[in-house]
Each structure stands twice: as C-alpha cells, then as structure tokens.
C-alpha cells in the first residue's frame, strides 16, 4: 500500500517549512501533512499571497525558514505554447529567484519538475541523469528552472520530477474520468501514451522525507509511482475503484485528440537515486490509486 507520509527514523525534522503554491493540488496535501506534525512550523503561501516572480517578496518570505518547498507553477501545458515567456517566468525565472533566496539564507530548497523535460521517445525508464530534450514549451520552461537550481544550489538544491498527478484537490485526470462517467455512457481514452500515475498525497510524503533527510545528496530525484500504464488503463482502474463498469472505457489513439502541445508518448521514470538518500521510492501505481481514495465510489459523480 502506498503511504501518505514517510518518516525517517533517527533524523531531526527541520522545524520551519515554507510551502509556495499552497492552494494547489500537491501544495494542499503537502501543507496538510506538515501541519499534522505538532513540532513543525509551517508557512503556507498561495499564489494570491506570494508572487514568486517578485524577488523582494520571495526574499522576505524565505527568510527564517529551514526548508522551502516550491509547488507553485504554470501548469497550463497547452497555454504555454502561446505564452512561453510567461510560463518560463514562473517555471524558470521564479525558481531561480527562490533558489537565490535560499542560497542567501542557507535554506534547503526543493522544487517540483516534470517528465516533460524528456522527449518521450525512449523505451526504457529515464534515469535521473538521462539527457533532457523537451518537445513542448511547458517542458522547456521547467527545464530552465531545473538548470537554475543545479547552478545556484549545487549542495542544497533538490529537483523532484513527477508526472500524471492526481489528488483530492483541483482538476486532474482521475476526477475528470469520474465526472464524465456521470455524463456519458462510454469514454474514449488514449492508449498510446504510457506513464506513471502518481497520487499527490504520496508525493507530498516523499517530499517531506527528502526535506528531512540531511544526508541526501543534492540534485535530481524522480517522484513518480512505480510501474507503468496508459491513460486508457488508468481510466479503467479508476472506474473499477469507483464501482463502475470498466468496459465503458474504450481505447483510442492520440491522433484522435490533437492538442496545441505535443505530449511525450513514453513518460516512465527510473527511481535509482532514492537509495542514495536512504529512502524507498514510491509504490506501485495501482496500489497507490486504491489507497488514495481519490476514486472511491463516493467520488463517482
């Protein structure tokens, strides 16, 4: 079963945490887990409360914290195709600003990146050192942020790439499938894109564990579920969890759903570096979906 939080035995958890993008799908889960620890002091700032592109505001927000976790992001993948400068300002420039502020105070910095930094043409899981080659504007914008962290914080900067996120907060694929189940008799879902569906609750726990792991080497980690599946199979699994007939989900191909931004066909990531941090990787995607409760029958509306 996928665990919602990871505690590292024998390690002193930092007491002062800052979470940016705190109202987002991942940020909300992260804040909830941190606030469950009575010894932790948590500053949770939403987009309305902190403009991460404002250097002065960022410096003031970072001051006084031990660990900064950045979940703020431009997440409109298709919109980035026509607004790449704006997307890069948030996913690249703002990450650099946060990293610079952390360098000034000595805070550990964790930021969330994406599988979209790869071209998706591989056939084996991409490891943490694989060459990047984004095929859309969103991926390029996130890669700018990654490069900034590696340059500014070579010893205390952490990049956690994730993919195919779903959770209880905000719009996501699993919740969309369950909503559409109440509106349509059948759903056509692409079966030629492969990835690792990842529950934000489990990823939030992994981020906390990494923030606590004092001996974890800096750099890139892959925060996705183990195993792999297609969007079609994920939709069927969500139907099964919700007590719905999975035969209502039918396979189709990506060319039937042309979108402004090209999507990688293969988004499977390797997880070898977690061993260097003394942490296990996230569990199997199917077990994670079941334990998350996101597709529970009560949510099939």
Image (cartoon, rainbow, N blue to C red):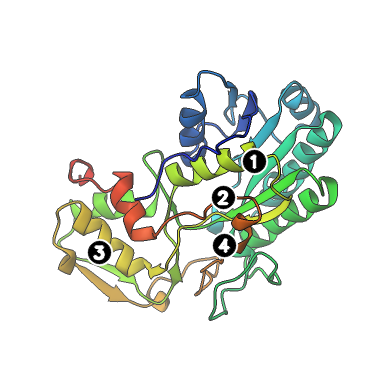
Image: 194 above or below 280? below
Q: Secondary structure at mark 4?
A: loop
Residue plotted at (46% across, 35% down) = 29
Image: 213 above or below 163? above
List x then y, in percent, for residue 227. Answer: 42, 67
Q: Secondary structure at mark 2?
A: loop
- Mark whose residue sits in front, 3 or 1: 1
Kindly check if marks 1 and 2 are in contact, taking CB atoms under 8 A apart as contact.
yes
Residue behind mark 3: 236
Residue behind mark 4: 271
CA gap, disc 2 and disc 3? 31 Å
Residue plotted at (46% across, 24% down) = 36
List x then y, in percent, for residue 240. Answer: 19, 58
The disc, 2 or 4, on the residue closer to the chain's N-terminal end is 4
CA gap, disc 4 and disc 3? 26 Å
CA gap, disc 2 and disc 4? 10 Å
- Mark whose residue sits in front, 4 or 3: 4
> Which mark is on residue 213?
1
> Which mark is on residue 279?
2
Q: Secondary structure at mark 1?
A: loop
The disc, 1 or 2, on the residue closer to the chain's N-terminal end is 1
């Amino acid at each position: 079963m996928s665990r919602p939080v990871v505690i590292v035995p024998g390690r002193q958890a930092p007491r002062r945490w800052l979470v940016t993008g705190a109202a987002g799908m991942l940020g909300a889960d992260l804040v909830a887990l941190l606030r469950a620890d009575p010894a932790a002091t948590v500053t949770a700032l939403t987009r309305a409360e902190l403009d991460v592109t404002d250097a002065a505001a960022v410096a003031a927000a970072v001051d006084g914290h031990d660990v900064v976790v950045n979940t703020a992001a431009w997440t409109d993948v298709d919109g980035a195709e026509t607004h790449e400068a704006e997307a890069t300002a948030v996913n690249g420039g703002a990450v650099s600003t946060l990293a610079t502020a952390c360098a000034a105070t000595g805070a550990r910095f964790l930021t969330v990146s994406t599988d979209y930094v790869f071209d998706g043409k591989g056939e084996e899981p991409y490891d943490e050192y694989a060459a990047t080659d984004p095929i859309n504007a969103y991926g390029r914008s996130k890669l700018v942020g990654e490069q900034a962290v590696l340059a500014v914080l070579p010893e205390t900067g952490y990049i956690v790439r994730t993919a195919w996120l779903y959770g209880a907060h905000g719009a996501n694929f699993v919740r969309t499938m369950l909503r559409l189940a109440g509106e349509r008799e059948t759903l056509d879902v692409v079966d030629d894109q492969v990835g690792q569906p990842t529950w934000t609750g489990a990823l939030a726990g992994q981020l906390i564990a990494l923030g606590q792991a004092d001996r974890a080497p800096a750099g890139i980690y892959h925060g996705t579920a183990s195993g792999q599946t297609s969007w079609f199979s994920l939709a069927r699994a969500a139907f099964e969890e919700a007590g719905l007939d999975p035969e209502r989900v039918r396979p189709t191909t990506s060319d039937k759903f042309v979108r402004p931004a090209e999507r990688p066909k293969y988004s499977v990531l390797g997880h070898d570096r977690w061993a260097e941090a003394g942490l296990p990787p996230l569990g199997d995607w199917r077990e994670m979906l079941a334990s998350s409760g996101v597709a529970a029958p009560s949510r099939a509306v």
